Amino acid sequence: MTKQIAIVTGASRGIGRAIAMRLARDGTRVALVARSADQLANVRDAIVAEALASDKTAAPMVLACDLCDEAAVVGMVREVSRHGTPSILVHNAGYGGPLQALDQVSSAEWDRVFGVNVRAAYVMLRELLPAMARDGRGTIVNVCSTHAMIGASGSAAYCASKHALLGLTRAVAAEWGRKGIRCNAVCPGYTRTDMIGAFADDPKLLSRIPNGRVGTPEEVAEAVAFLCGSGASAINGAALTVDGGMLADLGV
Ligand SMILES: NC(=O)c1ccc[n+]([C@@H]2O[C@H](COP(=O)([O-])OP(=O)(O)OC[C@H]3O[C@@H](n4cnc5c(N)ncnc54)[C@H](OP(=O)(O)O)[C@@H]3O)[C@@H](O)[C@H]2O)c1
């Protein structure tokens, strides 16, 4: 049987790396996308090393690409599609920008946050959805954030972009669901990666999380793999929080 192909953005480290490793373990052929070719090659090598122990994994593709560059994104989708229509898209790459009050955010910074988090998703979806619809199957998971559901000071551009990505997720579910395509969001809370660095051990942060710890990239990857799989066949337009209970706790 032909392997499914999954495009995973932001696969060079953190949550995206864990998602790529997890999907590859299921036998999916992953297309690894980020800017740093070296780090992507490391992820590819890790997947290939696992494949030596199990013949389920298929050779990953490495595609170094700046998601803010529309022509590069279109080229990336076309390059992957030469091997077959991807049936899975995980838009995980994200950029938070510096912690700043709104009146300090430059237009260039605002555009960069939206470029990676939202516009790149639109471009990839525009390029992929017609082919997925022709195949009558496709599953998309956008990695949003708890910041897609609440506000946070110092993060206006990031919060606005993640709310937008969640809105895009729901619109795609509504518009393309009848063509066999599902589109869902995973909303991680604080997760131990480079993005939050040492903040992951901040006692004040930990006191706000009912689980008493931040999540791991692998825990987020499990939620993504679930939404990509047939076990989630009735789930479309949903937002699944993976936050250790943080949003459920009013904290009073
Ligand atoms: N960690 C958390 O606490 C947390 C919480 C909620 C939501 N999230 C979301 O989860 C996702 C993954 O986060 P993470 O913590 O794993 O982040 P991370 O460690 O900072 O990794 C970000 C990934 O995005 C890629 N990327 C950034 N800008 C890019 C661009 N212009 N073009 C192509 N790729 C780009 C990076 O690769 P290169 O640098 O190689 O390009 C890297 O692979 C993000 O969407 C983030 O917003 C994270």
Image (spheres, rainbow, N blue to C red):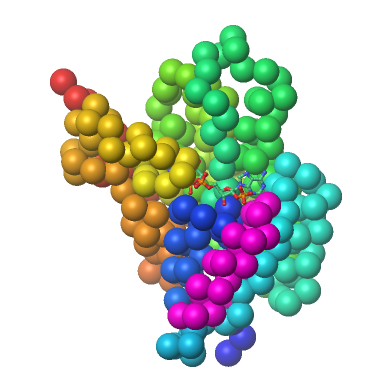
Q: Is 41 or 59 nearer to us in this picture?
A: 41
Q: Position of residue 33 (x, y in %)?
A: 64, 58
Residue depicted at 76% across the width and 60% down the height = 76
Q: Position of residue 48 (x, y in %)?
A: 54, 79
Residue depicted at 70% across the width and 47% down the height = 67
Horizontal relation, residue 176 to residue 240: left or right = right
Q: Please say whether residue 134 is one of the residues in the magenta stretch.
A: no
Q: Taking the image as drawn, is residue 178 in sight? A: no
| Residue sticking out furthest to the right | 71
* 181 shown above or below 171: below
| Residue sticking out furthest to the top | 103
Q: Image quadrant for the N terminus? A: bottom right
Horizontal relation, residue 245 to residue 21: left or right = left
* 61 shown above or below 118: below
* 21 shown above or below 189: below
Q: Position of residue 183 (x, y in %)?
A: 53, 54
In this picture, which residue range is highlighted in magenta?
26-50
Q: Is 4 or 179 nearer to us in this picture?
A: 4
Q: Please say whether residue 46 is one of the residues in the magenta stretch.
A: yes
Residue depicted at 57% across the width and 57% down the height = 12
* 163 shown above or below 186: above
Q: Taking the image as drawn, is residue 58 in sight? A: yes
Residue depicted at 72% across the width and 24% down the height = 108
Q: Position of residue 9 (x, y in %)?
A: 60, 55
- The mark total stands at 0
